[in-house]
């Protein structure tokens, strides 16, 4: 019989004052006893509503039942039958808007902590020697993956399980894409990412780094190399700016550059000589997960004051509630209903302040959403020495420019159908290259859909 307690088993976290000055993981995860206790809250519903909220169709009640019995390795096997990256998704997936939002236990209390249990299973297996990845028999067909972010890794993993000869082409010197350069160590340790990639390699997936597709080789040339299908999961690494005065001053970063310097180039380690400004007062413009990551990273690099400047209300903040909660605990100040109008510099061309204007929510539009409206005469200067723009990214146009037959929309995103097929025969795409900046789990879902479509495509042509 299920444990009917209304709240989740709490998870241990670093103290906010301590963690705000280090890059160690914030959430320490469940112990075995805690995981078993939380798993016993699951009702094991026959219609499995939680599964319908999972973009990669994890068999949630099945794996949780195994956890409740203490059969952690079997639970892991069930998870990895549909999800190649459980240690990652268990940490960064917005479960509160996905599987947990469908959990029946959430009607009269808190939903089952599905994400924490998924993470526990993956971490348990890693700490206890792992479950040997089985390399399937090769089916004689080759597929290329462009990009080693969550979409590319998921697609590669699903195709490898089906026996395909899979090669990933990664532009950076290290595989992992946004998981390595975008998400900070305190949310997603890089050793975890590399461990998941090693699991894929054990299944036969090959990874080629320093391969900028569109420069070193084109998609057309990959097809000429004998690949029967290609999946493009190159992400959205082209940063957006507001187009306001002062964005060229010293001390203005895109969040993409700032986080890459910290995460991939390890600017937070003293023995790495990676140039990044040691700031005193930082303004981060935006309200998504990337903005939270940039703000919390700036605090950890030693800033005395870090502000989130967001033009809408707190209720409309798109970042995960957990990330907002953690940021507030760590001392990040939220300037909601504020909007930057210009960045002001000193005589030497360095940032000295941001001129902001206060906003209020106007009347609802046809969709019911209230747009922010400037309050006349409310301008003021916010004294800062660093500004980080976290207002979104777009796909790099390089692949589109160097490939025949690929169509993009007005945002530069690749056009695909429901099967993730592009307008070029044999070429599929997914993740941020198609949607623009979105969540890791949605990118994983796209990679999974594409793998199924590629398998069907190759089989229909042979």
Image: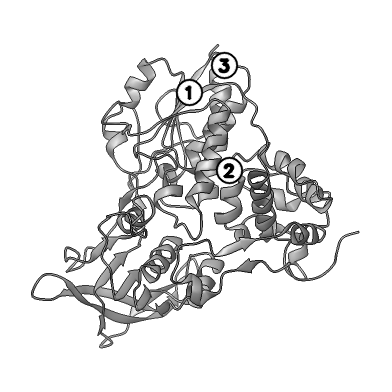
Position of residue 112 measured from the top left corner of the image (x, y, whole percent):
73, 61
Q: Which residue is mark 1?
A: 143
Q: Residue at horizontal 85%, vertical 67%? A: 4
Q: Which residue is mark 2?
A: 85
Front one among 196 and 58: 196
**Front: mark 2 or 3:** 2
Task: Identify the image's colour scheme: rainbow, by chain, secondary structure or one colour.
Answer: one colour
Position of residue 379 measured from the top left corner of the image (x, y, whole percent):
25, 84
Q: Considering the numbered disc 3 on the image, is that residue within a helix, a strand or a loop?
A: helix
Relative vertical location of residue 189 with respect to residue 164 in this rendering, above or below: below
Front one among 316 and 180: 180
| Label 2 to label 3: alpha-carbon separation | 29 Å
Q: Considering the numbered disc 1 on the image, is that residue within a helix, a strand or a loop?
A: strand
Q: Quadrant of residue 459?
A: top right
Please rate how many residues cluster around mark 1, counting C-alpha atoms within 10 Å: few if below 14, some from 14 to 19, many from 20: many
- The numbered disc on residue 460 is 3
Q: Residue at horizontal 48%, vertical 72%? A: 327
**Front: mark 1 or 2:** 2
Relative vertical location of residue 95 with respect to residue 238 in this rendering, above or below: below
Q: Residue at horizontal 56%, vertical 69%? A: 14
Q: Is residue 450 visible?
A: no
Q: Quadrant of the C terminus?
A: top right
**Front: mark 3 or 1:** 1
Q: Residue furthest left?
A: 347
| Label 3 to label 1: alpha-carbon separation | 15 Å
Which comes before the other along the chain, label 3 or label 1? 1
Q: Is residue 210 left or right of residue 62?
A: left
The reply to whether dot 3 and dot 1 touch (C-beta < 8 Å) is no
């Amino acid at each position: 019989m299920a444990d009917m307690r209304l709240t989740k088993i709490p998870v241990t976290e670093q103290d906010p004052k301590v963690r705000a000055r280090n890059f160690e993981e914030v959430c320490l995860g469940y112990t075995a006893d805690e995981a078993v206790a939380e798993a016993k809250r699951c009702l094991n519903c026959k219609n499995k509503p939680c599964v319908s909220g999972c973009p990669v169709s994890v068999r949630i009640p099945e794996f949780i039942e195994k956890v409740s019995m203490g059969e952690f390795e079997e639970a892991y096997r069930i998870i990895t039958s549909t999800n190649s990256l459980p240690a990652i998704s268990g940490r960064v997936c917005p479960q509160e808007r996905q599987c947990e939002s469908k959990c029946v236990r959430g009607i009269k209390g808190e939903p089952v902590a599905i994400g924490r249990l998924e993470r526990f299973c993956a971490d348990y297996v890693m700490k206890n020697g792992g479950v040997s990845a089985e390399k399937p028999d090769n089916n004689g067909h080759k597929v290329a993956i462009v990009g080693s972010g969550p979409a590319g890794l998921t697609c590669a993993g699903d195709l490898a399980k089906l026996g395909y000869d899979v090669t990933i082409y990664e532009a950076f010197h290290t595989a992992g894409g946004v998981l390595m350069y975008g998400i900070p160590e305190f949310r997603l340790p890089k050793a975890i990412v590399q461990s998941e990639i090693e699991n894929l390699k054990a299944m036969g997936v090959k990874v080629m780094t320093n391969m900028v597709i569109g420069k070193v080789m084109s998609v057309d040339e990959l097809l000429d190399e004998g690949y029967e299908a290609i999946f493009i999961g190159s992400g959205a690494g082209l940063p957006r700016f507001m187009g306001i005065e002062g964005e060229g001053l010293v001390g203005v970063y895109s969040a993409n550059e700032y986080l890459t310097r910290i995460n991939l180039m390890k600017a937070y380690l003293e023995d790495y000589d990676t140039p990044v400004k040691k700031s005193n007062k930082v303004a981060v413009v935006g309200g998504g997960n990337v903005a939270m990551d940039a703000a919390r990273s700036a605090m950890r690099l030693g800033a005395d004051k870090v502000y989130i400047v967001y033009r809408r209300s707190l209720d409309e903040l798109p970042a995960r509630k957990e990330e907002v909660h953690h940021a507030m605990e760590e001392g990040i100040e939220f300037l909601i209903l504020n909007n930057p109008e210009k960045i002001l510099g000193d005589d030497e061309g360095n940032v000295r302040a941001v001129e902001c204007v206060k906003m209020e929510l106007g009347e609802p539009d046809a969709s019911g959403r209230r747009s922010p409206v400037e309050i006349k005469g409310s301008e003021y200067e916010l004294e800062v020495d660093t500004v980080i723009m976290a207002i979104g990214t777009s796909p790099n146009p390089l692949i589109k420019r160097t490939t025949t037959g690929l169509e993009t929309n007005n945002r530069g995103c690749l056009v695909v159908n429901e099967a993730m097929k592009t307008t070029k025969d044999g070429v599929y795409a997914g993740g941020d290259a198609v949607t623009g900046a979105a969540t890791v789990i949605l990118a994983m879902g796209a990679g999974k859909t594409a793998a199924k479509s590629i398998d069907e495509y190759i089989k229909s042509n042979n």
